[in-house]
Amino acid sequence: MSPCYWLALLALVPLTLAANPGVKVKLTDKGIEYGKQIGIASLQQKLKTIKVPDLSGTVKVPPIGKVKYSLTGMTIVNLELPKSALVLVPGTGVSLAITNAFINLHGNWKVRYFKFITDSGSFDLAVNGLTITASIAIKSDETGRPTVSSVNCVANIGRASIKFHGGASWLYNLFKSYIDKALRSTLQKQICPLVADAITDMNPHLKTLNVLAKVDQYAEIEYSMVSSPTISKSSIDFSLKGEFYNIGKHQEPPFSPTPFSLPQENNMLYIGVSAFTPNSAGFVYNNAGALSLYVTDDMIPPSSPIRLNTGTFGVFIPEIAKRFPGMMMKLLVKTVKEPTISLEPNNMTVQASGTVTAYAIQPNTTLSPLFVLNMEGSVSARLNVTGVKLAGAVTLNKIEMTLGTSYVGQFQVQSLDNIFLMVLKVVVIPKVNGRLEKGFPLPSIGKMNLVNTQLQVLKDYMLIGTDVQFTG
């Protein structure tokens, strides 16, 4: 099991000073408890690697005199951390306390006295009442990813008992207190360095945090922190930029996030995505020219009686049939500015302004413009979480079209309503949904899975409540 993934969420520190975040995350006490269990299991495995060096010395044992001893081949046969607590220090950091831990060791002993008498056997050492307290520092590296280190650690061994096997019991019972003291001191010196190592070992995992996550060939989304995490007694709230950018070109949109807050409920993790985040996506894709689509007749279902040719359109606009007889047509549907996404309770609406330009395809494949329509439309979106991505689909609410430019004389735009409704419903909307189905990545670390996930659309933001599982 990989160590303490939950610390990734704690380790985010301010990189910029933006007024409001686009995305917020709350790690609740339930999530902290889950993370602690993972961390303690990892720490337990780390402590089992304690290497106890061979010990030797000389003690005076009345009435025998000087007794030379050696302890060799000492190995840990059991180590348990049955009781632990992770305490959030408001506004400060994290404190870890482990109590009632114990370690059992097995080894070999040998003694020599009166210069020529030797004795040997094995022994078992039981260390009980072990306590460990550690403070963990959390900061950011130069890339905006989290890094952790041990600031302070204290380990104390409450009591130890040793049992010797083999040899003359009357002898080793006389000097076992010396052995107890030497072993306890050796063990106590090794525990805190191993705790520090266990904490440092988390950093390669923390570097997997998707501070800058690629979405597709047009866009990436940034999840760097915009302010310090807010630590309370029961949760950690932290603020992420949550902004889409064109790949390789970070241009700020002409709008900014509005403030919102997350509830304290029963899931491990809450992710709030403000309307700013999808609006920044619209800004990016519009700038990239990705919100445009050429529609041709082969994209229309064969069963449709409506075809994209001058014969169909010539019924409503005779000049088209007269000037461009028997030709196929092509439509260019594109936005003229970024769409606007609004979030209200249980409702996500996208308002879009665009144009539809109709072309006749000449026999030599050149395009002759026929007309340009201005289009105002709105769609409703359904959202869902799939894997560690936020995905969705849209349905058409309404569309209004007016004539922008005509190269074939004046005509009634309303006469084309059925044609363009069909084009939008069977071609454009499915294309949009195909892209939305792929989703965009949510903030995550390592092999993180979201389970028991629920999504709500609220005023100005969407709320994802979820539990978390790590698979490695």
Image (cartoon, helix red, strand yellow):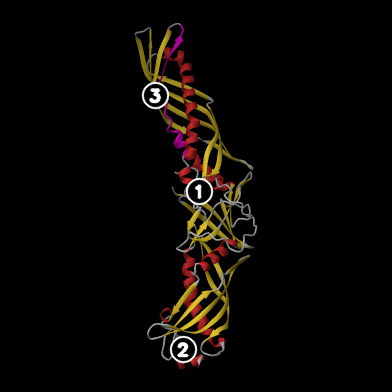
Q: Is residue 259 above or below residue 121?
A: below
Q: Are marks 3 and 2 in contact (CB under 8 Å)?
A: no
Residue at 51 percent across and 89 percent down: it is 408
Magenta residues, as a range? 42-62
Q: Do the residues labelled 1 and 2 touch (CB within 8 Å)?
A: no
Image coordinates of residue 449 in percent, x first then y, are: 48, 53
Near-viewer residue (19 or 384): 19
* Labelled disc at residue 107: 3
Q: Is residue 372 above or below residue 40?
A: below
Please, what is the three-letter code of the amino acid marked with disc 1? Thr
Instruction: Give the CA separation, mark 1 to mark 2.
Output: 58 Å
Image coordinates of residue 383 in percent, x first then y, are: 54, 65
Identify the mark nearer the N-term, 1 or 2: 1
Identify the mark nearer the N-term, 3 or 2: 3
- Mark 2, secondary structure of its residue: helix
Residue 456 can be seen, yes or no: no
For residue 63, what is the image quadrant? Answer: top left
Image coordinates of residue 186 in percent, x first then y, are: 47, 24
Task: Judge left or right: residue 198 versus residue 401.
Answer: left
* Labelled disc at residue 320: none
What residue does disc 2 label?
A: 312
Please, what is the three-letter code of the amino acid marked with disc 3? Gly
Near-viewer residue (75 or 291): 291
Q: Is residue 51 on the magenta stretch?
A: yes
Between marks 1 and 2 in the image, the one whose residue lies nearer the viewer? 1
Disc 1: CA contacts within 10 A as few (<14), some (14-19) or many (>=20)? few
Identify the mark nearer the N-term, 3 or 1: 3
Give the total of numbered labels.
3
